[in-house]
Structure formats: C-alpha cells, structure tokens
Image: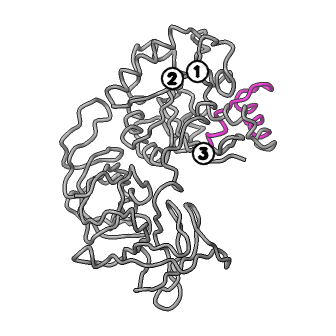
Amino acid sequence: MASSIFRFLTAGSVDDGKSTLIGRLLFDSKSLFNDQLASLEKASLLKHGLQDQIDFSLLTDGLQEERAQGITIDVAYRYFSTPRRKFIIADSPGHAEFTRNMFTAASTANAIVLLVDAPKVKRKKEILPQTRRHAQIASLLGIQNFILAVNKMDLLKFNKADFFQIARMFEDCANDLGIKNFLPIPLSALQGENIIEKSKKMSWYDGPPLLRALENFLITSAPSDLSFRFPIQLTRGDQAQFLMGRVTSGQVEVGDQVLVYANQKVIKAKSAQRTATIKKISQHKKELKRAQAGQSVLIELDKVEGENRGSLLTSINKTVLRTKKFKATLCWFSEASLRVNQPYILKITTKMTEVIIERILERVDLEGSENQIAETLYMNQIALVEVSCEEFLAIDLYHQHQETGSFILIDKSTNGTCAAGMIRAAI
C-alpha cells in the first residue's frame, strides 16, 4: 500500500518530451490497464504506421485539437502508484500564452520535473526562456523539490561532459531565481533510460533514476500535519446546529476546543471570533472520534450562534490571521485586463466577499530578472499586489496553509474567474 500522495508537475520548453516522459513512466511502472495499452498501441499504429512502435506522448495528449496542432494546450493529469507512494502527475503546457495553466497546476505540486532538450540546449549554449519561465513560476509558488530532467541524452550518445555542462548552465539560472536545491538527472524518455531503473548506458551517473528520486522526496507540509482548518460549506438543523464541510488540514477530536470565525460583515475583528467545543463528529450517519485532512464530515458544536457558509473552524492554539488587507502573488487569467480600484469577488475556500486591488506593487518579469512597475495586468502576467477587502477575513499565508492561503477572483460583470492568488502577508 502506498503511504502518501505526492503531486508533481512536468514542465519545460515546447517539444522537450514532457508527454513522452509521463507515458514512459506510466508504461514502465506497469500502471496501465490492458485496455489503455491496447488503445495506445492502436493510436500509435494509426499515427506512425508501425506495429512495434509506441508513441508514449499519446497517453497525455487527450484533446483532438491538441493532437492536430501537435502541442499540449491544457494541463493533463495522470495517476499511478508504486509500493512506496501514490502519485498525481500534471503535464503542463510549454507555451508562454498558457502560463496561467502552469501556475494553477504548480500551486498544489510537491515537486517539479523540469525537462530540457539536451541537444537543443547544447546547440544554443543556454537554458531556453520557456524553461526559465517555468522554473521562476515554480520558485514563486514555493516548490522546494526541483528535478532537472536532461532529456534526449540518446541523441548526444549519452555523453557525460554534455550532461554536466547543461547542469552547470541551469545552476547559473537557479542562482538568479533563488532556487537553492535541484537534482539534475540525465535520461532518455523515448528509450526509457534512467526513468525506472538506473541506466547502463550512463553508468557514469551516480544519482538515482527519476522514479526513485520522486519516491525519496519528503512531503514537508502534508495537510494532516498542519493545524486544524474546517471551512463550513452548509449548515443543517435549527440555528445551524450541524456544520457540514471538509477538513482542509490537521485533525480534530470530539471534546476539542476550537475557534469559530463567523461569516459576517464586521467592524471589529474580535466580534466575529469565539470559542466552542466539538460535541459530535459524524460521516454517513456514523459517529467518529476524530476527523482529519481530506475527510468531509458533519460537526456539531456545544453551542451555536448562527454560523453559516463561509464560516471557519480552526485550532485554538494556532489561529489564522484576521485582516481586511493583504499582499498576494496574483496570476491574471482573463482576456480583459485588471482594473485597479474596481470591485471583484474574492472566493477563498467557501467564503466570498467583495475586494479591490488597491495597487500593483511589482509585476514579475518572466522574460528577464528585473521586476517591473505596472498599472495593470494582462492575461498570463504575474504580480505582487495589495488586496483590500470589504470585511475582515480569516486567512493563512500560502506557504503555511495552501487552501486557506489561496483564492480566486471573479469578475462581477461576467461571473468568470479572472485570476488566482496566493496570500503572502497581512497588512
């Protein structure tokens, strides 16, 4: 039985082999069902006309338009497991115009596998801009585990000197971006070298193959290890006696004291905060002694004061921040540009409220190293901004609690999602 879920993102420049790598990983780890394998063999035959050739990239290229264009245009998720760990893989698009897709996928990742096309980098003598952009986004979102997958080593005849030269190039890029640790791995996704087992063709490499490295990474902030957070989704009974929701982090037991942050417009932060005791926890009409991260449960408190959707229960000793203003890293999704000092709807867990972006502190330069002064944001741009809220919010910093530290913005006129953000500091 796998003991934990590990989420990792594959990224890099166009045609670096991300989809092929994931397909090879699923195939070599024996994570494909017979019907999936048969479908893959049939699709490969139709595409290449050869009986014995499998195109592993077809496992993640699920969209007809995407196949027709020969590019990956959305994030494709796949799942597999080993005896040591369960994995969720996100294959993100390589194009600059899909930065928002990569930003969303990276926000929940424990690690990034950043692919580079070894022959291309050797020829250009530099790390490509798209590779740098993806490394910068992962660094912004606080991903700690970096793997530099130096792919297509078969086209360089598995040359040791070429691999170490490319690793040194990325080290210079990593230093500029503040990336402290990364593991370079030479591999060939097409031939399956250094994917599951150590490659005999690159015996000079003394590190782990890709799968072993992913199994060995530590999950530094597993939701179950964090302090208790329970956003209320629905209520039942007289005076909202029963609170329904999902535990986003930590755990709670019957008899524990908790803090209740009410969902209401207030002038003073203290008036929306009180203590209560967990009287009962149940799930599917079965009573539980405790609930932990990931479980959807019904909670009954010893006393109620009209809590509703958007209220939050937390640990009594590790409280959230109460604020009407905060700094956040924002990635803009919409074709319509950001309007500073105009109202948007902010949704954080089950809570929704009106906010404005008071100012853009700096726009991240994804093409270079110097951040920029800006008055607006356009699609796929990222910036540090100040957010002002209509009412006090109970929030966490993103690097401490991802779910209660991240949010989306909704355009009031279209009701469409226009941005995603990560809370950096209360003001």
**Does the magenta run of residues contain 45?**
yes
Q: In this view, does 284 lie above or below 249?
A: below
* Residue at the image point whose x is 81% and y is 42% from the top: 34
The mark lying in front, picked from 3 and 2, is 2
Q: Where is residue 87 in the image (x, y as percent from the top left)?
A: 62, 43
Residue 413 appears in view: no
Quarter of the image with the C terminus is bottom left
Q: In this view, does 270 lie to the left or right of 36?
A: left
* Residue at the image point whose x is 27% and y is 72% from the top: 391
Mark nearer the N terminus (3 vs 2): 3
Q: Position of residue 352 (x, y in %)?
A: 37, 70
Q: Mark 3 points at which residue?
A: 88
Q: Pointers 2 and 1 in contact (CB under 8 A)?
A: yes
The type of residue carrying mark 3 is Ile
Q: Name the residue under label 1.
A: 207
Q: Is residue 419 above or below residue 315?
A: above
- Its colouring scheme is one colour
SS state under label 2: strand
